[in-house]
Image (cartoon, grey):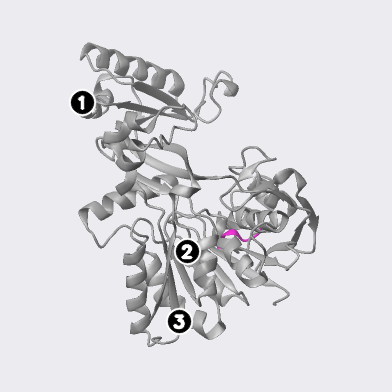
Amino acid sequence: MKQQIRIAAGQGFWGDLPDAPVRQVEGGPIDYLMLDYLAEVTMSIMQKQRSRDPSAGYAKDFVPLMKQILPACVQRDIRVTANAGGVNVEGCASAVKEVARELGLSGKLKIGIVTGDDIMPRIDELIARGVAMRNMDTDAALDTVRDRIQSANVYLGAAPMVDALNRGARIVITGRATDTGLTLAPLIHEFGWAANDWDKLAAGTIAGHIIECGAQCSGGNCQYEWNLIPNLEDVGFPIVEVSPDATFIVTKHKNTGGCVSIPSVKEQLVYEMGDPHDYITPDCVADFSTIRLADAGPSRVRVFGIAGKPATDFFKVSISYSAGFKAVGTLVYSWPEAYAKARAADKILRARLDRLGLNFDEVLTEFVGANATHGPLAGEPSADLPEVQLRVGVRGENRAAVERFTKEIAPLVLTGPPGVTGFAGGRPKVEEIVAYWPALIPKKEIVPKVAVIDV
């Protein structure tokens, strides 16, 4: 058994720094590269892509990235876990296999494929059998939006990925798995942690939580003394150095920018934390109140003392559905009396919408530069603000009404208050609203599938 496993985060979301994974592989020794591509809305985007093109539906950025780093990964014995598969895991794996063969790596690696998370084809059958998948926020039954569902994916845990690693996979590609599972799976595989060793599973889960958002724990988006964080243009992505006893160090490669500190780690810990006593995953329930942090040197934070609890009998399901349409328009009003002009323009616009008989579920106005960020807490804006951006958004079920709204922004330039700029982008675009439906499903309903293919 190895006495330490180094797992490096290379992507915090689909669209993160393109060269971050390359720098993690080339910047120093690591054992695993973890790549987190998926967010709730990402699945619906990928589902739409696949509906137009059966070969699409995964993070296509992942394939050229693998072409760039695979030779080094094979040479240095680095394994990769990634949820880049989206709603077409097999298609993603096939593309990576083709790239590996182009690189002359046939016979030198195996690709693990984890599926079973996509329950879109089973929705009607599940509802008919009484698996309601009620909305966790509103308690509404799923059949109330059945005709508008775009995607439905279960958050699988670490176990299927562990299976793939145990069977020799160098690259493990999943669909909708938990962000934390991408880090936890290598630890279970390497250290042989038992399925009911809740404290260690919780520690591995928290290690995954800390690095799942990439540089957000190594200096990016950090409030604490943000202006003193060095060299963010060359920010180092995080690495966890984990021991068999489940204690670990959060760090980054030497000679990279950013900073790993107790404050930066704390900020990431509270991100999407929920109840600190019960951070629920498919693998365990982690108690964040037991986490202990200690300074272990420059850009090194030791994490220990973590306690866990037994896993629940449910998986979480991420469901997306169509919820109407929206459009957002902006104009910038300049000094003098910028805020007063923007407010007057908003009043004029709303009156015109009413005159046209346009009805929306919501009309939302923000005055950027005055109070958009802090709302009422901002107090009364100064009368001598140099500029204020009027930002107005509408949403509703009637696409034609939203389309009509987009034609009412430009006329304000010549038929409203003076001093307007910032309309070079043209009319606002109508966009479909994709809403999120969180639900639970009994684990007995889901059977993850694991395949390992040779290149």
Q: Is residue 136 left or right of residue 248?
A: left
Bounds of the magenta segment: 229-233
Q: Secondary structure at mark 2?
A: strand
Q: Position of residue 304 (x, y in %)?
A: 77, 56
Q: Amino acid at mark 1?
A: Arg
Which label sits on residue 109?
A: 3
Question: Image check: 272 left or right of 441?
Answer: right
- Marks 1 and 2, Cα distance to the nearest angstrom? 43 Å
Q: Where is residue 14? Give x, y as percent.
A: 43, 56
Q: Quadrant of residue 185?
A: bottom right
> Which one is in front, 206 or 121?
121
Q: Which residue, given by chain and number where applicable, does mark 2 sit on?
A: 82
Q: Main secondary structure of the magenta part?
A: loop
Which residue is at 64% across, 59% downward? 195
Q: Amino acid at mark 2?
A: Ala
Q: Is residue 324 visible?
A: yes
Q: Is residue 119 left or right of residue 23?
A: left
Q: Give the residue displayed 65% in from the left and 37% down from the top.
A: 275
Crowding at mark 3 (Cα within 10 Å: few <14, some 14-19, many 20+): some
Q: Depth-wise, is mark 3 or mark 1 nearer the camera?
A: 3
Residue 229 can be seen, yes or no: no
Indicate whether residue 398 is drawn in magenta: no
Residue sitting at x 56%, y 20%: 376
Residue type at mark 3? Leu
- Vertical placement of residue 129 versus 352, above or below: below
Residue at label 1?
404
**Which of the two discs, 3 and 1, labels the residue nearer the N terminus?**
3
* Front-most of residues 387 and 209: 209
Which mark sits nearer the N-terminus, 3 or 2? Answer: 2
Between tags 3 and 2, which lies in front? 3
Which quadrant does the C terminus fall into?
bottom left
